[in-house]
Image (tube, rainbow, N blue to C red):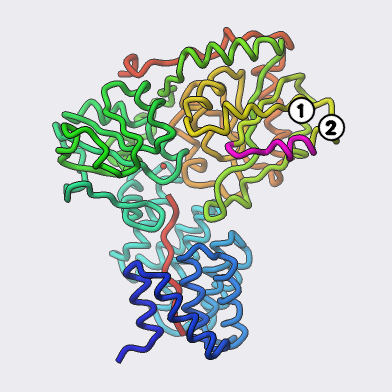
Amino acid sequence: MDSPYHIAKDLAEHGQTELAWKLIDKLLIENPLDVQALTMASFLMYKLGGLTQAYHFARAATQLVPENAAAWTNFGHAASKLWLIDEAERYYQRALKLSKTQFDFTVLWINLSALALDNGQFEKALEYVRKVLAVDPTHKSALTNLGFCQLALRDWRGWEGYHGTIGSDWRQKVQYKGEPEWDGSLGKIVALYADQGLGDEILFASMIPDAVKVCRKLILDCDGRLAKLFARSFPQVKVYGTRVKEEKWAKEDRNIEASLPLGQIGEFFRLSDESFPRTPYLIPCPDRVKQWKALLAEKCKPCIGIAWTGGVSKTGQRERRCDLPNWLPLFEAIDAHFVCLQYKDVQKEIDAFLEQHPSVELTQYPWGTLTADYDDTAALVASLDAVIGVPTSVIHLSGAIGTKTFAMKSKSSCWKYHAGLPFHPATLIEYQGSWIKTIQAAVPLVLKHCGSSSAMTHASRLPITSFNTRSSATPADSLPLHP
């Protein structure tokens, strides 16, 4: 008869995580020091989104069995999901010293490679990946992480490994009617579906014009916030903002023959540096742009959008927050009207900052950013003289529209930033060891672009490029082990 721990593990692996947690919780009520239950509790809490609970369950297990490699492996995994990078590496290294089997070593090498990828250390990640592949050349997670390393280093064969993330917690696999994955073959009716977050959808949309040329019909199933913007920008594509709810499509569009995540079409169309056009490809609403330009023209000074936070906890939000005091070198260098491009309401944060720095002109326009229609944000961004920010969706939006974009790398940059953001024409600012130093490095570039005249108009901005004129996931790591 299976133990309750194995039953809980089996339930979790079949998507019944809450039921598994009830079983483990019952065991912990009976014995709060049950190491196996604590270990499984850490794994289940991670699956349920309780990252801090997962961390403390794992920590308790290491205190009870300090010489157990699996306990330290789990603790490292929990720490990594909280982006406690240095902690996670210490715990993984301790587990390596305690490990005795090749299986344990392989798990740890995979997790260390994932940790290095999260930390933007792609060469280091490659070293761990090669250790695994030397033992097992077919190891799926190792091949996936190899793909991330290759893409980051502009070796575009990495799309093959990147394919391995499809069907993971980070990147869903969708089959609308049991159709196969698209293999890039010509003349198919193809559905491309939303790939991870909003920023990735925008960034990977740069490849849609290439797909249009080879498909008999192309259907784009995107986030509803992007539907209007994408439909205008790609008129040859049938766009639905339904996020895999195919029953809402018109009947004539349901006879699809193949499907694929939007970002994965890079394996067909982005196989060399030269295959990236790095030109604008999104078209904002012309009427809304006119309205924004009329409003901003009254400022009689450069209008610069800024974004100082990005992501969520599991995508490195901790490393992608540049608090407003860090922006003082930019605020003091340029007499500009600064526009908040945060997608959440930050008025209280702005008010507190302006109380200390009343000479700064920073404004939040909620009808442009706090909206369910990204067309509103796109029109605002298209009307600005420049945009500068941390890694976040609006940076990709700005680059895709053609507004002058200064994209600041974070301490732990993803593969797309490490590769130089080749999908759109943004200017990349290297991380300088701290956010304030990174902004100081950006100031001369921003000043050169829009600080020479305090009476700039908005007529000199890059033109909106029509679609008709034209000829990026998370590394794999292993599930926690169980002592």
Q: Amino acid at mark 2?
A: His
Task: Determine contact: label 2, label 1, CB under 8 Å.
Answer: yes
User: Quick one: 145 or 459, which is closer to the camera?
Assistant: 459
Q: Position of residue 386 (x, y in %)?
A: 61, 22
Q: Position of residue 145 (x, y in %)?
A: 40, 57
Of labels 2 and 1, the one closer to you: 2
Part of the protein shown in magenta:
343-352
Q: Secondary structure at mark 2?
A: loop
Q: Position of residue 304 (x, y in %)?
A: 65, 23
Q: Is residue 477 above or below residue 449?
A: below
Could you tell which of marks 2 and 1 lies nearer the N-terminus? 1
Residue neighbourhood size for the residue with mark 2, other residues' Cα within 10 Å, grouped as few (<14), some (14–19), many (≥20): few
Q: Residue 55 occupies which quadrant of the picture? A: bottom right
Answer with left or right where residue 161 lies relative to residue 94.
Answer: left
User: Quick one: 228 or 322, which is closer to the camera?
Assistant: 228
- Residue under label 2, please give it: 357
Q: Residue 5 occupies which quadrant of the picture? A: bottom left
Answer with left or right where residue 477 lies relative to residue 62.
Answer: left
Q: Residue at x 45, y 18 (%)?
A: 285
Residue 397 magenta-drawn?
Answer: no
Q: Which mark is residue 331?
A: 1
